[in-house]
Image (tube, rainbow, N blue to C red):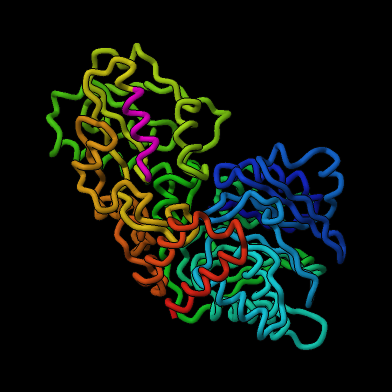
Amino acid sequence: MCGIIGVVSRHPVNQLLYDGLLLLQHRGQDAAGIATGYGSQFRLHKGSGLVRDVFRTRNMRDLPGGSGIAHVRYPTAGSSNDSEEAQPFYVNAPFGIMLAHNGNLTNSAQLTEEMFRRDRRHINTASDSEVLLNVFANELQAAAVGVSLDPQTIFKAVSGVHRRVRGAYAVVAEIAGYGVVGFRDPFGIRPLCLGVAETDRGTEYLIASESVALEGLGFRLLRDIAPGEAVFIDVDHRMHAQQCAPNPTLNPCMFEYVYFARPDSVLDGVSVYAARLKMGETLAERIASELPHGEIDVVMPIPDTSRPSAMQLAMMLGLNYREGFIKNRYVGRTFIMPGQAVRKKSVRQKLNAMSVEFKGKNVLLVDDSIVRGTTSQEIVQMARDSGANKVFFASAAPPVRFPNVYGIDMPTRSELIAHGRSDDEIRRAIGADALVYQQVADLTRAVSDLNPALKRFESSCFDGCYVTGDITADYLNLLESERERGGPPSEDGRGRNQLNLQLSTMAD
């Protein structure tokens, strides 16, 4: 999961892109990058770390220009911390393109092979974003007539990308001397929205992963970019849009609403905050039917994502709501930290329990989800250590039983505490006195009630249904066996490519 921004402005964009990345920092804390268009040239700076650590004043001075793209990275399974894999990526042929991408391609190694053998393009990193960039560049070269571009040529190239690429992807790219293009996969898995601002010099446009980035930068949310659609803003600040996929369907990732997106964002017509409130309502119904009402003294959220659900749940059940955990805001989000040991160690650095709120009480802890169980187990023990009489645990999301292959680090079943376990076995594993999960149907209802146009979601980590239709049992089995046998295969890019080529062949 990553955050992306693309902008065409009538003012210098370096500060705008930097501020936008700060607004999207929650989407990735591993690396950051900014590329700006300066005439027919690009200026680029990127590196590992938080936005505030990657960019210094001298770096910002070296990023002139009135257009650009930016990216924050969260590494998925198998990716490394190598700064070479920080985005955006660049190619100089046929037109000079910078590209940043959010998502995960499920046929990246097959495409890498095609690039090398058929298209004579070489992929230098293990990043599927570089693969996507080269596919787009090759399709642009095939679609172009002569040495100039027009919007229809660009849209034709995006159509070619949709034909060849499988998986989840939201993309921003800048073509040197022409403008910025943004497009979304035909299933609409990853979010992407378009904003507009009227300034004293004229109209400006911004494309971003979440609406919070638009609003925080003074842009008005115009609309979400549709699945399969491409939006091109040229250097003359004219916007062009076209549907580039034959049969697009909207299947937004449910985990965006559960965890990843900021609560003040609106994704595909749904307020994330309102969705989390609704999750609290439906979870309250479940708790009322499963737990003795009189046993719960107090409801407490696990900061921060679960707070709206916990507040609404407490109100619905007529229970006291308290903040029992104080969060250290200088520690990153534990779910997106690579490695079990790092996540476990970071929990007690990130959260401190206030004994005065726990001592002698039966507490209901509410979290947004339970993925690996490491955090949940530590938190339950912290509550007991602080004097809780009983510790009940509720998850605003259903059990995470299946791998996610679309850009979230839930790669293998063996790492998921809910896979192959009953709810009671999970309860015992995390040490809770009772455990209540949201149901898939209730979660779907909580979000779709806020926008009835949303009929389907990408909920594969909960229900095992992969909307792209190319994920087989053999694909998942091989992915899991390779990861367990040799660790993250992409620490050696060749190992990752060999593995994924096998996976791509199986998915064909």
The answer to if 376 sits in the magenta stretch is: yes
Q: Identify which residue is drawn at 61% across, 52% down.
A: 80
Say which of 332 and 64 sits in front: 332
Say which of 253 and 131 sits in front: 131
Q: Position of residue 261 (x, y in %)?
A: 49, 46
In the picture, residue 363 is in which quadrant?
top left
In the shown orientation, is residue 506 left or right of residue 27? left
In the shown orientation, is residue 210 left or right of residue 43? left
The answer to if 263 sits in the magenta stretch is: no
| Residue 305 seen in the figure | yes
In the shown orientation, is residue 359 left or right of residue 260? left
| Residue 369 seen in the figure | no
Q: Position of residue 270 (x, y in %)?
A: 42, 52
Q: Is residue 496 above or below residue 266?
A: below
In the picture, residue 427 is in which quadrant?
top left
Q: Magenta: predominant secondary structure element?
A: helix
Number of numbered labels in the structure image: 0
**Segment colored magenta:** 372-382
